[in-house]
Image (spheres, rainbow, N blue to C red):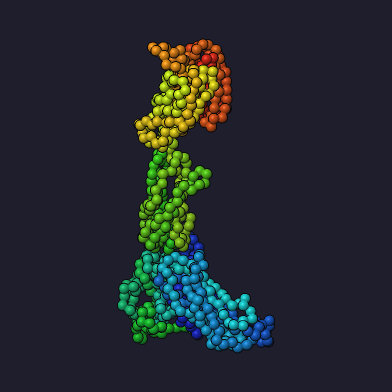
Amino acid sequence: MCPEYSPCPRKPLICVCLLLAGVLLAKPASPGAIVRLGAPMARPLAGAVEQSLWGLSPNGAAADMFPNDVGATSILPAPDIYSRFHDTVFPGGCVMNLGTQIQANIPVICIISDSATGARVYGPETAYVASLGPGDSRMVCFPSWIPPAEERRYFDTVATAFPGDQDTTNDWTYGRLTVSDWGMGHLSYNDGTFETRLTWLAGGEFAERFIAPGRPVTIESVAVWLSSTYDTTYDAQVRVYDVANSPLGFPGSQLGAWVGRLRTDTWPFLCKNYVHFEPPLVVDRDTLFVSYYQTSIRPNWPYLGLDTIGNTGHWNHWSRPKGGSWSQGEVGDCAIDVYFAGPLLDAAVDRIGYPPGQIEYNTNFKPQVIVKNAARCSCHDIPVTFCIIGNVGDTVYSCTASSGPLAAGETTAVTFAASVTPGPGEYTMTCIALLPGDEIPGNDMLTMPLVVNTPLFDASLEEIVVPPGRVEPNTTLNPKIVVRNNAVYDCNDIPARLCILTTAGDTIYASTAGSGPVQSGQSGVVTFPDSITPSLGYYTITGITLLPCDINPGNDTLVGQFEVMYPRFGVEASAVDSIYFTITPNPLGRFAAARHSLPKAGFLALVFYDATGQKVHSQVIAAGRVGTTVIDLRVLKAGVYVVKVKANGFCTTQKLVIGRWP
């Protein structure tokens, strides 16, 4: 037990009934701290009708005052309040005559607007103050309002609309109203009497009732604030009772008790006493009852006095006779703060259930995450957002889902409705829990890398259909080739390029086209859009598939020859049938070996073009008529190239793929 002291002003004798029912709340505590619930001295100051001499000089003369000036001075019961779902809100405010003349029939307006959208949700409601003398103030009450049962914040504005007001700068004041499933997220007090705290005196026994959030709450301790006519320490007990299922006026089962010594201070000072429960109390009821009294002074009644929880419609109505009376605390006062273990609102992202960190190409999935209610109380829902972000910061997927109700400490899998099929590459997965009022935001977000494997494709060129080996003069051709998808994946398209060269090495035709979708193990036809009408002579035709990520480039190129001549009788062997140049195997190192059969020995001119058709390198090497030639590739970067080969009386093209240097 650790006493603390806090000065308090004397309680006003006039109490206001028409405030916010059930919304007499404290601000939320900082994340990670033990939350303190209630106020050390619960007083109806917000409902007191007070006067102020603002603007008056010490001798009572007017100082910079207008004859006609009425202003709104405050929002009641407080400028920043909280409300639970289904609570009834009683808007109110204070207005004051700041001028030097008596004013009558003063209109006062109240408007409540959504803070996010600005939409008006209440009012304008108008009330009138019959008369105000100079310096007088009055409280104005407006019709009650029940906000929608959804997490939202509102602006509450109270303004005077007095005709002829000579100073409009003080005509309005505003406050904030936060509506949530938890109210303030702490234990609050609400007995239907519109008092901030109720003190029950029965033969030395004091009692107060608190409204729990309607969910399991673990209470570690209470803080008892005491004030009396004497500064003294005495033997006392603090007991907690369940009253949710008990008859009106009677406590239910005892949840816990503490026996020790409590200390008071002399009014108007309060002494704070910490009372710890071992083990902590688990409260799963709408209400609980805390009492404390001197052990040496037994109460006249063995049971604690309770009011009717406001269901009779009568303010300050007691359900039990002779139980005691309501004390305003002129000679003695008390208040209770309730402490609980852990936050009331804390959502955590436990892990990403799917996908794992690495998936195969063309995988379609719906993301799944595991979320946890890390608070000490149950939660009706935890909204979660899941995003997939590319390596350049672009968002390729974003979806939000809800967990549904979760008990304290419970985990559940949340599967998102939208599916996604990310392309090959590296991504970052991000999951964020969006629980309103989360008291520990440090565990709300989880990130994880995602790698989509590059697909293993293999496209081969099977046949050059058009042109055939011999073509008659004046024949217009649209070249056509057959490609095959040798991979286990279906392919959306197999691009290919076809070139026709003369024996002098001149390119007379070059075109690129695609096959369209080709299923695994199937073939597709590529018809090139550009036509050609070759003249008489011999030609070399080369087709190359240009599929990215091809794992077997050795079957990508096909070279053929054809001639354009008039029809002849008989069969004549062509010398070009024995002429070829091929890089085998396709190199993945710094040097490549090429097999060739040329019309005659001499020099080979090799020109390298990249995938965009730009010339990047050329070299000339000496070669025999038949044999193997070594090609130096050290000046080239990794990539796909088209090599144009030219020799005396021979010309062709060849696809070349260079892997990463070791």
Q: Foreground: 89 or 605?
A: 605
Q: Foreground: 190 or 152?
A: 152
Q: Residue at x 45, y 24 (%)?
A: 475
Task: Please say whether residue 255 is visible from this viewpoint.
Answer: yes
Q: Foreground: 534 or 434?
A: 534
Q: Residue at x 63, y 79 (%)?
A: 167
Q: Residue at x 42, y 69 (%)?
A: 148
Where residue 541 sits: x, y (%)?
47, 22
Where residue 248 sits: x, y (%)?
33, 79
The quarter of the displayed image where residue 217 is located: bottom left
Q: Residue at x 42, y 57 (%)?
A: 383
Q: Foreground: 329 or 171?
A: 171
Where residue 274 sits: x, y (%)?
46, 69
Where residue 602 sits: x, y (%)?
55, 12
Report how many numbered discs are placed on residues in the image.
0
Q: Is residue 317 left or right of residue 141?
A: left
The relative height of residue 524 versus residue 31 in the rendered view (above or below) is above
Task: Please say whether residue 654 is visible from this viewpoint.
Answer: no
The relative height of residue 412 versus residue 11 in the rendered view (above or below) is above
